[in-house]
Image: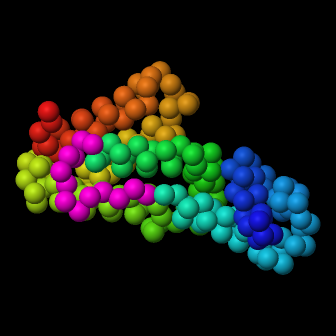
Amino acid sequence: MEIRDKLLAAAARVYAETGFRGATTRRIATEAGVNEITLFRHFGSKAALIGEAIGQVRHSMVTTTLPDHPGDPELELFVWARNHLAGLRAQRSLIRTCMGDFEEHPEMIPPCGSTPARAAEALRGYLLRLRETGLSRGAFDERAAAAMLMGSLFADAMGRDLMPDMYSGDPDAGLTEYIRLFLRGIGVELS
């Protein structure tokens, strides 16, 4: 692994654990196995390093595509949502830290172009296709519907370990119920 990559990985780990203030350049450099001067040569500042590290994690999150021609909305949305949820869960420490630092460092959470924004856009397109094909017969605003499902997935990813009594014991059973409730809400007939 190259020095730059080691620094980015270390910065993401340390930032997720300690936030912006606790992620000192000394700690990041030590975690990466380099000295601070090397860190500054590559990135110039702590803010630049952490910003790039968060960006790299954000862009590395895999998004599953939804089909151009819907056939089985329940299965298609379940697979898509399970993959999106897994990505959120894998990065929940980093996401929580970014949210906690948002007031002081709003640049740590980009307004658009992120994996969740791209996922929401893909979901909106899929919902329009469901309507166009007649698989969805409900009257709904696709932005509001997409935000509702994305919000449920986000809440599950961020809250399941903090408030386990609030969620179904089996994550896949809970996800199945989210999808079924959602599809009924937008007028998809389920078997």
- Magenta segment: does it hold 73? yes
- Residue numbers of the magenta segment: 63-75
- Magenta segment: does it hold 123? no
| The image quarter in which residue 162 lies | top right
Q: Image quadrant for the C terminus?
A: top left
Q: Is residue 26 visible?
A: no
Q: What colour scheme does the image use?
A: rainbow
Q: Is residue 121 above or below residue 140?
A: below
Please name the residue shown 29% across and 52% down the image: 146
Q: Is residue 176 above or below residue 55?
A: above
Main secondary-structure element of the magenta-colored stretch: loop
Q: Position of residue 106 (x, y in %)?
A: 58, 63
Side of 66 where 33 appears, left or right:
right
Q: Is residue 141 above or below residue 43?
A: above
| The image quarter in which residue 168 lies | top left
Q: Position of residue 182 (x, y in %)?
A: 24, 40
Please name the residue shown 23% across and 62% down the image: 68
Q: Position of residue 186 (x, y in %)?
A: 17, 45
Work out whether residue 102 or residue 54 is closer to the camera in this orientation and state it.
Answer: 54
Q: Is residue 146 above or below residue 167?
A: below
Q: Is residue 115 visible?
A: yes
Q: Image quadrant for the N terminus?
A: bottom right
Side of 81 where 54 appears, left or right:
right
Side of 140 where 107 appears, left or right:
right
Please name the residue shown 72% across and 46% down the image: 17
Side of 18 where 100 appears, left or right:
left
Please name the residue shown 32% across and 34% down the image: 176
